[in-house]
Amino acid sequence: AWRGGRAGQHVRIGLSIDGRQYHRTYSISSPPEREDGCFTITVKILEGGRLSRHLVRNLKVGEYVSVGLPQGNFHLPDAGAMKLLFISAGSGVTPVRSMLHSMIALERHLDTVHIHYAPHEYDAIFGKELQELPKRFAEYAYLPVYTRRLGNASRKKFHFSSAQLTKLCPDWREREVYACGPQEL
């Protein structure tokens, strides 16, 4: 009963592990315009997370995984061109990646500023890919902020703030803003 969703939505994944059912919600990280009809989720092993650990380390070909229908209101409107500001942190980048690739597939105007927070450069999910996008699309600006710069005792200055927002994206009040990340963001 699968039906395609919208870029930015999520699905509920379920697995039976050691005789018990586990469910978790994951954002779809691929655009719905994929020609093969497939979709991707991006899973990070969480401390104590049975489902995430099983998906990453132990899932076998042929194992049954229940997948709910795409849902959620975190998606772009059907309108054409718009000025966007994405603010993401950690795995909050996954629905943003889906939206970006959907806009590219649909050849929608990408006047987009993307501020992404991660502890370190090596922690930025899709970081290398997103750093390459401005080389292909000049109207997309990827602005990573690494909150745990090595050797710096004052990490607070790298966390989200109104002053930082105004510095990184002076016209933020003129943009449609989409933010996704952990509650601390």
Image (spheres, grey):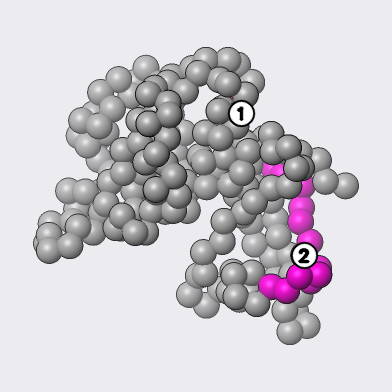
Q: Residue at x 25, y 32 (%)?
A: 168
Front-most of residues 92 and 55? 55
Q: Residue at x 51, y 64 (%)?
A: 44
10 Å crowding of disc 2: few (<14), some (14-19), many (20+): few
Does residue 64 show up magenta in the picture? yes
Residue 31 location, quadrant: top right
Q: Position of residue 20 (x, y in %)?
A: 75, 79
Per the rendered image, the range of residues in magenta is 59-77
Judge from the rendering whether residue 16 lies leftward or rightward of residue 46; answer left or right. Answer: right
Amino acid type of the residue that numbered disc 1 sits on in the rendered structure: Ala
Judge from the rendering whether residue 124 lies leftward or rightward of residue 171; answer left or right. Answer: right
Q: Helix or strand or loop: what does disc 1 sit on? A: helix
Mark 1 lies on residue: 105
Figure check: 163 above or below 21? above
Q: Helix or strand or loop: what does disc 2 sit on? A: loop
Q: Is residue 112 visible?
A: no
Does residue 76 show up magenta in the picture? yes
Residue 35 location, quadrant: top right
Mark 2 lies on residue: 65
Residue lying at the far bottom in this picture: please name it. 18
Amino acid type of the residue that numbered disc 2 sits on in the rendered structure: Val
**Considering only order in the chain, which callout, 1 or 2, is on the residue closer to the N terminus?**
2
Residue 119 location, quadrant: bottom left
10 Å crowding of disc 1: few (<14), some (14-19), many (20+): few
Front-most of residues 95 and 104? 104
Figure check: 102 above or below 21? above
Q: Residue at x 31, y 44 (%)?
A: 144
Q: Position of residue 12 (x, y in %)?
A: 70, 55
Which of discs 2 and 1 lies nearer the camera? The answer is 1
